[in-house]
Structure formats: structure tokens, C-alpha cells
Amino acid sequence: MNTALVIRICVITLVFLVIALIWSFVKDAGDGMKFVFVIFLGLAGGLLAVKFFIPWLGDLMGEAVFSSGEKVEQDHMTKAAARIAQGDYPGAIEQYEIMLVEKPDDPFPVAEIAKIHAERLHDPQAALKVLEEHLQSKDWPVDDAAFIMFRITDVHLTHRHDYDAARDMLEQIIGNFPNTRHSANAHHRMSELEQLQYKLLMDQRLKTGSSEAAKA
């Protein structure tokens, strides 16, 4: 029980005790005193309603409408994190799959499942399969589709070192979402990819030159 709720209960209880005490004095009094007591009771009830009951009711309604789904999602995320900490990666995937069943339009659990396959189980091919199957499973909103496609790019680039596949996915993002921030981000990633490939090429040439010089 939280502190605010305890305070509300204590205040309401105190008010009722005060009302009961006053009533014990005025119940045998004349009609005038009883009338004053009724007015006091109405004012006290109105103040309690405005100060405590209405905000409490609003909190309950807001929690029911907005917080229940977030709490469920947080529970699954917490359980998944605990499974990962224990090294139970299939168990973590299972938690994200439950979340995905409950929120099939959320790309986050899809990305997390793929991340576990790629980073924890060292199976980037399985990660790609998860991402690609979900990408093709429905017409995702633009932001969600781009999010999944960027995750595919990351797997190709970081875990498979397949620069051609990463470039192809970035080109698809540019072509599918022109004149958007996703296209701009893909152009930026393409530039970074080209710089990385150039650096690798120079390193290879340097190693080749050093090897030939050593042989000579």
C-alpha cells in the first residue's frame, strides 16, 4: 500500500470520527443545531470528495486504461532480463514471444528475440530469419518497418560482416521510404559503410604490401 493511499484513509477515518463525535453532541439538540450539522456534513463530504475521492477515482481509471498493458509488458521484460542474466536464453526468447502474442504490432520483442539469437546464441542466421519473417508477415507502419529493416542491416554488418547485404538493405530503406528521416538515416549509414569498406581495403593492401616486402 503506498503512502498517499494510507494518508487518504487516515484523513477520511479522522473526518468520520469527528462527524460521529459532533453528532453525539447535537443528536439531542434542537432542529437549528441539527440543521447546522447537516450543512457541516455536506461541506465536509464535498471537501472529501474533491480532495480525495475524485482524484483517487481518476487514478484508478487512468491506471486501468493506460498502465495495465505497460505493467504486463514490463513484467515480461523483467522476466526476460532475469533469464538472460541466468544464461537461460531460450527462456528469455519465450518471454519476448509471449509479449509478441499479446502485442503483435510491437516490433520491439521481435528485435529483442533477434538480438538474443545474434549476440547470445551466436546464430546471426536465426536472427535474420526472425526479423525477415516478421517483416514480411504484415504491412507494418513506416516507422516499425524501417526499425526492423535497420535491425536486419545491423545483423548483416555487425555479426555476419556481409557488407553487400547490409548495403542492399539500406538501399531498400532509401527506396521504400524516400524523403523521410529513415531515408536520411540510411544515407548516413551508407556513408559510414563505405568509409568502413575503404578502411578495410587499405588495411588489406597494407598487409599485402608488408607481406611481399618481407618475402623479398
Image: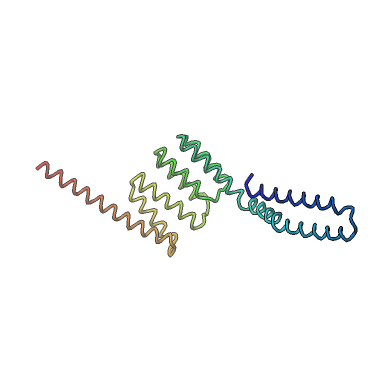
- In the visual, does 133 lie left or right of 200? right
Does 92 sit above or below residue 184? above
- The percent position of residue 106, horizontal first and vertical second, equals 53, 50
* Image height of 102 relative to 142, above or below: above
Tell whether 215 sits left or right of 37.
Answer: left
In the displayed structure, does residue 162 sit left or right of residue 46?
left
Residue ID at (48%, 54%): 145
* Count of picture labels: 0
Residue 178 pos. (x, y %): 43, 63
The outermost residue toward the left is 216
Measuring from the top left, give residue 25's x and y in whole percent.
Answer: 85, 52
The residue located at (46%, 51%) in the rendering is 148
Identify which residue is drawn at 19% across, 49% down: 205
- Report x, y in % for residue 83: 49, 37
Please state which of residues 53 and 107 is positioned toward the viewer in this rendering. Answer: 53
The colour scheme used to paint the residues is rainbow
Q: Quadrant of the C terminus?
A: top left
Q: Quadrant of the N terminus?
A: top right
Q: Nearer the viewer, residue 33 or 3?
A: 33
Residue lying at the far bottom of the rendered structure:
179
Q: Position of 171 compared to 73: left or right? A: left
